[in-house]
Image (cartoon, rainbow, N blue to C red):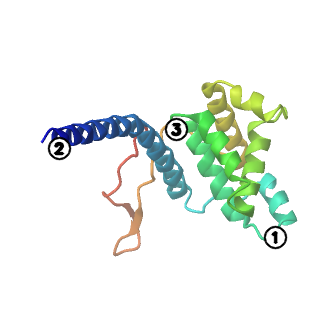
Amino acid sequence: MVVARRGHHLHEQAIERLLDDLCLFHPLVEVLARRVEQHEVQHAIDDRDLEPPPEVLARCNATPTASPEDVTAEVSAILAEIVRGPLPRLTLAHAISLGSELGEAHHLTAEVLLEVMNPDREDLRALLRRPGPELVSRAQRAYTRLFGRALTRESRLAPPVQKDAIGSNRETSSWAPVKVR
């Protein structure tokens, strides 16, 4: 009987430790979810509407297996993650590290990000040591330079437009702003 109680007690302690560990990971999952959300919201905002900038075209022309549209979409979404997400340094470091792992388009995306986020060509470690607000400012300037429009901290999906019976455009009532926490 004593052995059974001791085993039960150890089992309860193990469950408590597991729950404590899960509580530690919950904030990390929240941060990652917000990063992914901002990335995907930017894809929806862009809706393949961006023209590939010269920095992308030059790299894609030298590497015909990568689509300029795909690289452009990823650069836009990652810059949006940096500007709107909670951890700009982590986002930039992650995007650059993925460049070597996920294929040619992501490799070119990482190259473009390094070029536009690091115009002084400083050491990568020095770039990643810069304060988050400075990286956000650099990402905003880079986005404006690449795409000719501002990237703000708030993201908003444009209201969908439908043609009514006589061919006029009208906004539908099904859209809502996307709030950035």
Q: Amino acid at mark 1?
A: Pro
- Local SS, label 2: helix
Residue 122 placement: quadrant: top right
Whether residue 153 sits left or right of residue 2 in the image: it is right
- Residue 64's x, y, as percent? 81, 70
Using the image, tell me which numbered label, if any, was put on residue 64: 1
Mark 1 and mark 3 lie on one chain; the one further toward the N terminus is 1
Query: Closer to the observer: label 3 or label 2?
Result: 2
Q: Residue at x 46, y 49 (%)?
A: 37
Q: Residue at x 70, y 31 (%)?
A: 128
Q: Amino acid at mark 2?
A: Ala
Q: Look at the numbered discs 3 and 2 and tell me whether their residues touch, using CB distance below 8 Å.
A: no
Question: Is 109 above or below relative to 21?
Answer: below
Q: Residue at x 74, y 54 (%)?
A: 100
| Separation (CA) of disc 1 from disc 3 | 32 Å
Using the image, tell me which numbered label, if any, was put on residue 85: 3
- Residue 89's x, y, as percent? 63, 34
